[in-house]
Image (tube, rainbow, N blue to C red):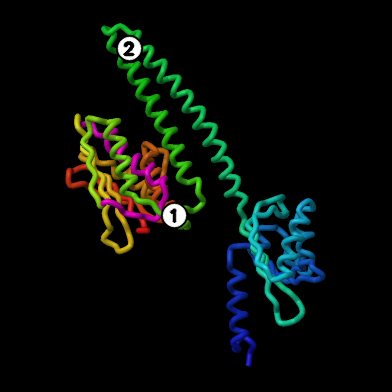
Amino acid sequence: MDEHDTPEGGEATRYRHLVRHIRDAVVEFELVDGEPIVREVNEAFVDDFGYERAALRDEPLNRLIVPEWKRDEARELDERTATGEVNYRRVTRETASGLREFLYRGVPYEDGTVRTDGFAVYTDLTDITQHQRRLRVLNRVLRHNLRNEANVVIGNAARLAGQLDDADDEAGESAAAIREAASRLERLTREAGDIVRVLSRANPAASDESVDCVRLARSVVRSHAQSSPTADIELEGPDAMWVSANERLELALDSLVDNAIEHNPAETPRVGVVVAADDADGWVRLRVKDDGPIIPEAERAVVTGDAEITPIQHASGLGLWLVRLTADAFGGELLFSTSEWGGNAVDVRLPEA
């Protein structure tokens, strides 16, 4: 009987197939006097680290890929492996093309002899990490500078408008246009800051947090009723409804109500905030509806992911992106439909707590 016909042989075949085709770099090693010695690597390891397979086999793993100044850290991980502990750590490793950052998982196992063997799995995080750093820098610098410059423009436009002769209609209109554009720019920086706050947690949906979304909705309605007294804002829902989210959900609700008022040219914009159990068990639906102009289909498609973002096709502001990213962060989704008033109905569907 062939070894692959035995249960053990079949399991080994499946394991080899998995390791061979998994995209993460995997190295199988044997601990010899506490030192991991390479016994086998998959193709992804060869690709990511840039070393030939023949040059890796039976060589000390740390001398090949651990920078000299990181050897103490590597020895600490190896000692944990020798005791049978699984390791998870973000590490810097040396490849043929230089240093790169990886998520390292060290998984030990014993083969029934006195040997302790293990697997080291490396997921390359370099591009993601560098991208995150660039975004953080751009966010901090751009938001700060744009907000400051927008405030300067708004202040000077207001002063200019006050000094212009009432008869100079064209100049007055130009000053008003400058002021409105600067206000929109300042609003974009605020929305960008809200997005950063929503995304500041790695995975809020994985936590045990919950929040009463009716309380948040009530707070949003009360705030906009004071800031926009000409708008007709109403709230429908139970006394309380708990969802798997946190206080940052209020930013998304606030943005939806703000958009519904801001983009409605009517003298008395009508806005409704509805909190209700969804048709699907275990879900809650937060709806903001209005009687204003319909959000363009192309803009909705970009935000929902049904269309690609292009220089021509993109959402005009960050408000809907804030809502979409908030829904994603809390394990929900964003939906668009038409309200019974002929305007927009924007739903955020979230897991019930």
Return the residue at label 1: 209
Q: Residue at x 35, y 58 (%)?
A: 352
The span from disc 1 to disc 2 (Cα, nearest Å) is 53 Å
Amino acid under disc 2: Ala
Is residue 117 positioned above or below 234 on the image? below
Write down the region rendered in magenta: 239-266
Asked if the magenta segment contains residue 253, the reply would be yes
Q: Residue at x 36, y 50 (%)?
A: 304
Q: Give the residue at the far right of this rendering.
A: 33
Amino acid under disc 1: Glu
**Left/right of residue 33 with respect to residue 311 in the rendered view:** right
Asked if the magenta segment contains residue 162, the reply would be no
Q: Residue at x 40, y 24 (%)?
A: 182
Which is more toward the observer, 112 or 42?
112
Q: Residue at x 70, y 79 (%)?
A: 111
> Where is residue 55, by image quadrant?
bottom right
Return the residue at label 2: 171
> Where is residue 140, by image quadrant?
top right
Q: Which mark is residue 261?
A: none
Q: Position of residue 242 (x, y in %)?
A: 35, 55
Mark 1, Cα crowd under 10 Å, few <14 / some 14-19 / many 20+, is some
